Amino acid sequence: MLFTSYSIKNLTLKNRIVMSPMCMYACDDESGRVHDWHRVHYPSRAVGQAGLIVVEATAVTAQGRISARDLGIWSDEHIAGLSELTGLVHSHGSHIGIQLAHAGRKALVEGPIVAPSAIAFDEKSRTPEALTEEQIGEEIAAFAAGARRAKEAGFDVIEIHAAHGYLINEFLSPLSNKRDDAYGGDKDRRYRFLHDVVDAVKREWDGPLLVRISAHDYHPEGLTPDDYVDYARRLKAQGVDLIDVSSGAVVPAIPPNIGPGYQVRFARQLRSEAGIATGAVGLITEGAQAEEILQAGSADLIFIGRELLRDPYWPRTAAAQLGVKLDAPPSYTRAW
Protein backbone atom coordinates (compact mmCIF):
# COMPACT_ATOMS: atom_id res chain seq x y z
CA MET A 1 0.00 0.00 0.00
CA LEU A 2 2.87 2.40 0.70
CA PHE A 3 3.46 2.89 -3.03
CA THR A 4 -0.18 3.10 -4.10
CA SER A 5 -1.68 6.46 -4.98
CA TYR A 6 -3.89 8.32 -2.53
CA SER A 7 -6.54 10.90 -3.33
CA ILE A 8 -7.34 13.70 -0.96
CA LYS A 9 -10.04 16.07 -2.15
CA ASN A 10 -8.97 17.24 -5.64
CA LEU A 11 -5.39 15.98 -5.34
CA THR A 12 -3.89 12.55 -6.05
CA LEU A 13 -0.56 11.73 -4.44
CA LYS A 14 1.63 9.23 -6.27
CA ASN A 15 2.37 7.35 -3.04
CA ARG A 16 1.57 7.56 0.67
CA ILE A 17 4.92 8.88 1.81
CA VAL A 18 4.84 12.38 3.27
CA MET A 19 7.83 14.40 4.34
CA SER A 20 6.81 15.68 7.74
CA PRO A 21 7.23 19.41 8.41
CA MET A 22 10.51 19.99 10.28
CA CYS A 23 11.94 23.41 11.11
CA MET A 24 15.23 24.13 9.35
CA TYR A 25 16.16 27.37 11.18
CA ALA A 26 17.85 28.45 7.95
CA CYS A 27 16.75 32.10 7.57
CA ASP A 28 20.02 33.58 8.79
CA ASP A 29 18.91 37.16 8.08
CA GLU A 30 15.70 36.88 10.14
CA SER A 31 13.65 37.90 7.10
CA GLY A 32 11.50 34.79 6.97
CA ARG A 33 12.29 34.51 3.26
CA VAL A 34 13.28 31.35 1.39
CA HIS A 35 17.05 30.83 1.26
CA ASP A 36 19.33 28.54 -0.74
CA TRP A 37 19.12 25.87 1.96
CA HIS A 38 15.37 25.56 1.36
CA ARG A 39 15.87 25.50 -2.41
CA VAL A 40 18.10 22.44 -1.99
CA HIS A 41 16.49 20.72 0.99
CA TYR A 42 12.89 20.40 -0.22
CA PRO A 43 13.39 19.59 -3.93
CA SER A 44 15.94 16.90 -3.03
CA ARG A 45 13.16 14.97 -1.27
CA ALA A 46 11.06 15.33 -4.40
CA VAL A 47 13.93 13.84 -6.40
CA GLY A 48 13.87 11.09 -3.77
CA GLN A 49 10.23 10.38 -4.71
CA ALA A 50 8.26 11.43 -1.62
CA GLY A 51 4.65 11.83 -2.68
CA LEU A 52 4.00 14.93 -0.58
CA ILE A 53 6.49 17.32 0.98
CA VAL A 54 5.22 19.57 3.76
CA VAL A 55 7.26 22.71 4.31
CA GLU A 56 8.25 23.43 7.89
CA ALA A 57 6.23 25.47 10.40
CA THR A 58 5.88 28.80 8.61
CA ALA A 59 4.93 31.74 10.78
CA VAL A 60 1.74 33.67 10.05
CA THR A 61 3.07 36.62 12.11
CA ALA A 62 6.61 37.78 12.80
CA GLN A 63 6.02 37.43 16.55
CA GLY A 64 4.65 33.93 15.97
CA ARG A 65 8.00 32.47 14.92
CA ILE A 66 9.46 29.62 16.94
CA SER A 67 12.85 31.23 16.31
CA ALA A 68 14.07 34.32 14.49
CA ARG A 69 15.45 32.01 11.77
CA ASP A 70 12.06 30.49 10.81
CA LEU A 71 10.34 30.76 7.46
CA GLY A 72 7.53 33.28 7.29
CA ILE A 73 4.30 33.83 5.41
CA TRP A 74 3.21 37.00 7.21
CA SER A 75 3.98 39.28 4.25
CA ASP A 76 3.31 39.31 0.53
CA GLU A 77 7.09 39.67 0.17
CA HIS A 78 7.37 35.97 1.08
CA ILE A 79 5.28 34.78 -1.86
CA ALA A 80 8.02 34.94 -4.51
CA GLY A 81 10.42 32.68 -2.62
CA LEU A 82 7.71 30.23 -1.66
CA SER A 83 6.63 30.12 -5.31
CA GLU A 84 10.17 29.08 -6.19
CA LEU A 85 9.87 26.15 -3.79
CA THR A 86 6.56 24.95 -5.17
CA GLY A 87 7.87 25.18 -8.72
CA LEU A 88 11.03 23.24 -7.91
CA VAL A 89 9.16 20.46 -6.12
CA HIS A 90 6.52 20.21 -8.85
CA SER A 91 9.23 19.98 -11.51
CA HIS A 92 10.41 16.74 -9.88
CA GLY A 93 6.97 15.15 -9.81
CA SER A 94 5.94 15.58 -6.17
CA HIS A 95 3.27 17.63 -4.46
CA ILE A 96 4.00 20.23 -1.81
CA GLY A 97 2.18 21.55 1.24
CA ILE A 98 2.92 24.17 3.85
CA GLN A 99 2.33 24.18 7.58
CA LEU A 100 0.81 27.45 8.82
CA ALA A 101 2.00 28.08 12.36
CA HIS A 102 2.12 30.40 15.34
CA ALA A 103 4.43 29.55 18.23
CA GLY A 104 2.44 31.31 20.95
CA ARG A 105 4.21 31.18 24.32
CA LYS A 106 7.02 29.04 22.86
CA ALA A 107 8.19 31.80 20.53
CA LEU A 108 11.88 32.64 20.93
CA VAL A 109 11.91 36.09 19.38
CA GLU A 110 12.57 39.51 20.85
CA GLY A 111 9.62 41.56 21.97
CA PRO A 112 6.33 40.46 23.51
CA ILE A 113 5.06 36.93 23.04
CA VAL A 114 1.41 35.94 23.33
CA ALA A 115 -0.73 33.02 24.47
CA PRO A 116 -4.27 32.32 25.62
CA SER A 117 -3.16 32.84 29.23
CA ALA A 118 -0.17 34.47 30.89
CA ILE A 119 1.50 31.19 31.82
CA ALA A 120 5.10 30.41 30.92
CA PHE A 121 5.93 27.06 29.30
CA ASP A 122 8.49 26.27 32.01
CA GLU A 123 10.64 28.01 34.61
CA LYS A 124 13.22 28.97 31.97
CA SER A 125 10.70 30.52 29.58
CA ARG A 126 9.31 34.03 29.40
CA THR A 127 5.78 34.69 30.57
CA PRO A 128 3.56 35.55 27.59
CA GLU A 129 0.91 38.22 27.43
CA ALA A 130 -2.66 36.90 27.43
CA LEU A 131 -4.38 37.72 24.16
CA THR A 132 -7.37 40.02 24.23
CA GLU A 133 -10.40 38.98 22.17
CA GLU A 134 -9.52 41.73 19.67
CA GLN A 135 -6.00 40.32 19.35
CA ILE A 136 -7.42 36.81 18.93
CA GLY A 137 -9.34 38.11 15.93
CA GLU A 138 -6.10 39.50 14.51
CA GLU A 139 -4.32 36.15 14.91
CA ILE A 140 -7.19 34.34 13.17
CA ALA A 141 -7.00 36.87 10.33
CA ALA A 142 -3.24 36.20 10.09
CA PHE A 143 -3.88 32.50 9.49
CA ALA A 144 -6.37 33.41 6.76
CA ALA A 145 -3.88 35.78 5.13
CA GLY A 146 -1.27 33.02 5.28
CA ALA A 147 -3.67 30.69 3.48
CA ARG A 148 -4.21 33.29 0.75
CA ARG A 149 -0.48 33.65 0.26
CA ALA A 150 -0.01 29.86 0.22
CA LYS A 151 -2.57 29.65 -2.58
CA GLU A 152 -0.85 32.42 -4.54
CA ALA A 153 2.49 30.62 -4.09
CA GLY A 154 1.11 27.45 -5.67
CA PHE A 155 0.99 25.05 -2.73
CA ASP A 156 -1.14 21.92 -3.13
CA VAL A 157 -1.93 21.35 0.56
CA ILE A 158 -2.23 23.43 3.72
CA GLU A 159 -1.62 22.00 7.17
CA ILE A 160 -2.68 24.01 10.23
CA HIS A 161 -0.26 23.48 13.11
CA ALA A 162 -2.37 22.77 16.20
CA ALA A 163 0.20 20.59 17.98
CA HIS A 164 3.39 20.57 20.03
CA GLY A 165 2.44 23.28 22.50
CA TYR A 166 2.21 26.11 20.01
CA LEU A 167 -0.56 28.70 19.97
CA ILE A 168 -3.54 26.65 18.78
CA ASN A 169 -2.55 23.71 20.99
CA GLU A 170 -2.27 26.17 23.90
CA PHE A 171 -5.91 27.16 23.38
CA LEU A 172 -7.05 23.53 23.24
CA SER A 173 -5.36 22.28 26.41
CA PRO A 174 -6.67 23.05 29.90
CA LEU A 175 -3.04 23.05 31.05
CA SER A 176 -2.29 26.25 29.13
CA ASN A 177 -5.73 27.85 28.67
CA LYS A 178 -7.14 29.30 31.88
CA ARG A 179 -9.45 31.83 30.21
CA ASP A 180 -13.05 32.32 31.32
CA ASP A 181 -14.38 34.03 28.19
CA ALA A 182 -15.57 32.82 24.78
CA TYR A 183 -12.18 31.15 24.11
CA GLY A 184 -11.73 29.20 27.32
CA GLY A 185 -13.35 27.72 30.39
CA ASP A 186 -14.62 24.42 29.03
CA LYS A 187 -13.88 22.00 26.21
CA ASP A 188 -16.20 23.68 23.71
CA ARG A 189 -14.82 27.16 24.26
CA ARG A 190 -11.21 25.96 24.21
CA TYR A 191 -11.94 24.52 20.74
CA ARG A 192 -13.32 27.82 19.45
CA PHE A 193 -9.93 29.28 18.41
CA LEU A 194 -9.12 26.26 16.23
CA HIS A 195 -12.69 26.27 14.90
CA ASP A 196 -12.39 29.93 13.90
CA VAL A 197 -8.94 29.43 12.36
CA VAL A 198 -10.22 26.53 10.23
CA ASP A 199 -13.23 28.54 9.06
CA ALA A 200 -11.04 31.55 8.24
CA VAL A 201 -8.54 29.45 6.30
CA LYS A 202 -11.31 27.73 4.35
CA ARG A 203 -12.64 31.09 3.21
CA GLU A 204 -9.31 31.58 1.41
CA TRP A 205 -8.47 27.96 0.56
CA ASP A 206 -10.49 25.27 -1.22
CA GLY A 207 -7.77 22.63 -1.54
CA PRO A 208 -6.82 19.73 0.75
CA LEU A 209 -6.68 20.85 4.38
CA LEU A 210 -4.81 19.00 7.11
CA VAL A 211 -4.52 19.71 10.83
CA ARG A 212 -1.62 18.47 12.96
CA ILE A 213 -2.63 17.72 16.55
CA SER A 214 -0.96 16.50 19.72
CA ALA A 215 -3.28 13.66 20.68
CA HIS A 216 -2.00 13.29 24.23
CA ASP A 217 -0.74 15.87 26.76
CA TYR A 218 0.91 13.15 28.90
CA HIS A 219 -0.32 14.89 32.04
CA PRO A 220 -3.06 13.73 34.44
CA GLU A 221 -4.97 17.00 34.01
CA GLY A 222 -4.39 17.31 30.28
CA LEU A 223 -6.07 16.11 27.11
CA THR A 224 -6.11 12.47 26.02
CA PRO A 225 -6.83 10.70 22.73
CA ASP A 226 -10.46 10.34 23.81
CA ASP A 227 -10.74 14.14 23.92
CA TYR A 228 -9.20 14.37 20.47
CA VAL A 229 -11.70 11.91 19.01
CA ASP A 230 -14.33 14.54 19.77
CA TYR A 231 -12.18 17.33 18.32
CA ALA A 232 -11.46 15.22 15.22
CA ARG A 233 -15.18 14.75 14.64
CA ARG A 234 -15.63 18.50 14.82
CA LEU A 235 -12.77 19.08 12.39
CA LYS A 236 -14.25 16.58 9.97
CA ALA A 237 -17.60 18.39 10.16
CA GLN A 238 -15.80 21.64 9.31
CA GLY A 239 -14.31 20.10 6.18
CA VAL A 240 -10.82 19.12 7.32
CA ASP A 241 -9.58 16.26 5.15
CA LEU A 242 -6.95 14.56 7.31
CA ILE A 243 -5.54 14.71 10.83
CA ASP A 244 -1.75 14.49 11.18
CA VAL A 245 -1.47 12.76 14.56
CA SER A 246 1.47 13.60 16.79
CA SER A 247 1.53 14.05 20.59
CA GLY A 248 2.93 15.96 23.52
CA ALA A 249 4.86 19.21 24.10
CA VAL A 250 2.15 21.50 25.46
CA VAL A 251 3.89 21.11 28.83
CA PRO A 252 7.38 19.71 29.51
CA ALA A 253 6.14 16.18 30.21
CA ILE A 254 8.02 13.18 28.82
CA PRO A 255 5.95 10.63 26.88
CA PRO A 256 6.27 7.16 28.40
CA ASN A 257 7.43 4.18 26.36
CA ILE A 258 8.90 6.06 23.42
CA GLY A 259 9.74 3.54 20.73
CA PRO A 260 9.15 2.71 17.06
CA GLY A 261 5.71 3.91 15.98
CA TYR A 262 4.73 4.90 19.54
CA GLN A 263 2.13 7.40 18.29
CA VAL A 264 0.50 5.13 15.70
CA ARG A 265 -2.15 3.95 18.17
CA PHE A 266 -3.46 7.51 18.39
CA ALA A 267 -3.81 7.76 14.61
CA ARG A 268 -5.61 4.43 14.61
CA GLN A 269 -8.06 5.52 17.33
CA LEU A 270 -8.95 8.79 15.63
CA ARG A 271 -9.34 7.10 12.26
CA SER A 272 -11.59 4.40 13.70
CA GLU A 273 -13.70 6.41 16.14
CA ALA A 274 -13.93 9.79 14.39
CA GLY A 275 -14.15 8.38 10.85
CA ILE A 276 -11.53 10.75 9.48
CA ALA A 277 -8.38 10.04 7.48
CA THR A 278 -5.18 10.19 9.50
CA GLY A 279 -1.45 10.42 9.04
CA ALA A 280 0.86 8.46 11.32
CA VAL A 281 4.16 9.97 12.48
CA GLY A 282 6.87 9.24 15.01
CA LEU A 283 9.86 6.89 14.83
CA ILE A 284 8.71 5.28 11.60
CA THR A 285 11.95 4.25 9.93
CA GLU A 286 11.45 1.08 7.89
CA GLY A 287 9.43 0.34 4.78
CA ALA A 288 7.97 -2.82 6.31
CA GLN A 289 6.92 -0.86 9.39
CA ALA A 290 5.16 1.75 7.26
CA GLU A 291 3.47 -0.94 5.19
CA GLU A 292 2.20 -2.70 8.31
CA ILE A 293 0.67 0.53 9.62
CA LEU A 294 -1.25 1.01 6.37
CA GLN A 295 -2.28 -2.64 6.05
CA ALA A 296 -3.64 -2.60 9.60
CA GLY A 297 -5.85 0.38 8.81
CA SER A 298 -4.11 2.55 11.41
CA ALA A 299 -3.51 5.46 9.03
CA ASP A 300 -3.90 6.61 5.44
CA LEU A 301 -0.57 8.39 5.02
CA ILE A 302 2.87 7.86 6.55
CA PHE A 303 4.67 11.01 7.71
CA ILE A 304 8.44 10.55 7.78
CA GLY A 305 10.56 13.04 9.71
CA ARG A 306 14.11 12.41 10.86
CA GLU A 307 14.56 9.39 8.61
CA LEU A 308 14.15 11.69 5.60
CA LEU A 309 16.84 13.94 7.05
CA ARG A 310 19.17 10.97 7.23
CA ASP A 311 18.17 9.61 3.83
CA PRO A 312 16.65 12.00 1.25
CA TYR A 313 15.93 8.93 -0.90
CA TRP A 314 14.12 6.98 1.80
CA PRO A 315 11.29 6.04 -0.59
CA ARG A 316 13.87 4.16 -2.69
CA THR A 317 15.18 2.44 0.44
CA ALA A 318 11.66 1.48 1.52
CA ALA A 319 10.77 0.22 -1.97
CA ALA A 320 13.84 -2.02 -1.97
CA GLN A 321 12.84 -3.43 1.43
CA LEU A 322 9.34 -4.17 0.15
CA GLY A 323 10.40 -5.54 -3.24
CA VAL A 324 8.68 -2.73 -5.11
CA LYS A 325 10.14 -1.28 -8.31
CA LEU A 326 10.27 2.47 -7.91
CA ASP A 327 10.89 4.51 -11.04
CA ALA A 328 14.09 6.53 -10.94
CA PRO A 329 14.48 10.19 -11.84
CA PRO A 330 15.75 10.03 -15.44
CA SER A 331 19.19 11.35 -14.52
CA TYR A 332 19.62 8.61 -11.91
CA THR A 333 18.52 5.56 -13.88
CA ARG A 334 22.04 4.20 -14.29
CA ALA A 335 22.51 4.04 -10.51
CA TRP A 336 19.00 3.61 -9.08
Image: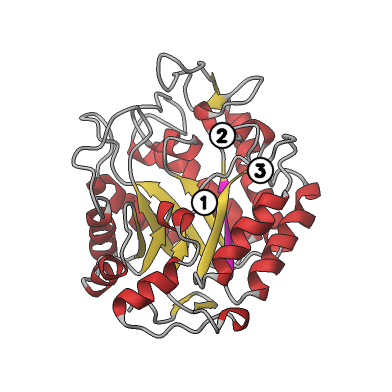
> Which amino acid type corresponds to the residue marked 3 in the rendered image?
Ala
Q: Are marks 2 and 3 in contact (CB under 8 Å)?
A: no
Q: Percent position (x, y) of residue 6?
A: 43, 78
The quadrant holding residue 98 is bottom right
On the picture, is 163 further left or further right than 131? left
Q: Which residue in the structure is indicated by mark 3?
A: 142
Q: Earlier in the sequence, mark 2 or mark 3?
A: 2
Say above or below: 122 vs 43: above
Element type at marker 1?
A: strand
Residue mark closest to the camera, 2 vs 3: 2
Q: Which residue in the structure is indicated by mark 1?
A: 160
Q: Most prominent secondary structure in the magenta stretch?
A: strand
> Which amino acid type corresponds to the residue marked 2 in the rendered image?
Ile
Region rendered in magenta: 95-100
The mark found on residue 66 in the picture is: 2
Residue mark closest to the camera, 3 vs 1: 1
Element type at marker 2?
A: loop
On the picture, is 153 further left or further right than 251? right
